[in-house]
Image (cartoon, grey):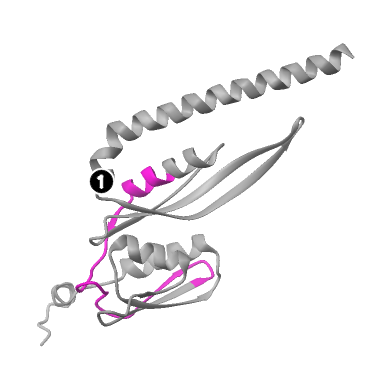
Amino acid sequence: MSQGSGGRRSSGDNRGGQGGDDKRRRGGGDRGQNQGGDRNRSDLIDKLVKIRRCACVVKGGRRFSFTAMVVVGNGKGKVGVGYAKANEVPPAVEKATREGGRTLMDVNMTGHTIPHLVEGHFGAAHVVLLPASAGTGVIAGAAVRAVCEAAGIHNILTKSFGSTNPHNLVKATLDALRQLRSRQDVERLRGVSLS
């Protein structure tokens, strides 16, 4: 009888300890965000694409952890993606947002659309991006839309084939955007003048 109550008491103590750790983690995350994040956070757009929960079976039951994928951009031709994991959802999202801010890449744009048709691949995901005229909007699924809006693309037509996994679609879209070239870039690379 005393062992059972002792076991309950110790598990309660552990929970209290975890709560204290969570408070410390949140406090540390807030401090870090105030120190380094507010400078760049004002002009960055972050969009949560997917949260996954993973369960690790241990002696006392299941221990859950969470992974988050966040697309970050400035809405003016820069976009990046962050993927992070933590024991709770908010710290995972914060870590993914910080990582996305560190992996920003430039996207060649013509006004509010892309200069030409382009295809991107990642794993079994295949994404096709087409330029669109003003007023078309972003015609895309959730994962591809998040990348386009974070990059500042307002008019685009998209089609995805194969895998519907949001992680693969985001990376395939980034692969497509990485292949975009402006007219000046093509002229410089080929050493010719395009009329």
Side (left or right) of 59 relative to 96: right
Residue at point 28%, 44% (across, down): 41
From this view, report whether residue 65 is shown above or below residue 113. Answer: above
Give the secondary structure at mark 1.
Answer: loop
Amino acid identity at mark 1: Ser
Q: Which residue is painted at 70% across and 21% down in the image?
A: 12
Q: How far across and down, in percent of the image, does residue 8 sit?
A: 77, 20
Residues shaded magenta: 96-125
- Residue 40: give x, y in percent of width and height: 25, 44
Q: In which quarter of the image is residue 127?
A: bottom left
In-front residue for pair 165/183:
165
The C terminus, quarter of image: bottom left
Magenta residue check for 48: no
Q: Where is residue 72 in the image (x, y as percent from the top left)?
A: 35, 53
Residue at 79%, 18% (x, y): give it: 7
The magenta stretch spans residue 115: yes
**Mark 1, residue position:** 42
Residue that lies at the very extreme toward the top in this rendered image:
2
Determine the residue located farthest toward the front in the rendered image. 135
Left or right for 86, reference 185: right
Q: Where the N terminus falls, by quadrant?
A: top right
Give how far across and how far down residue 39 sits, in percent: 23, 40
The residue depicted at 38 percent of the width and 63 percent of the height is 147
The crowding category of the residue bearing disc 1, from other C-alpha atoms within 10 Å (few below 14, some 14 to 19, many at least 20), is few
Furthest toward the bottom, the residue is 195
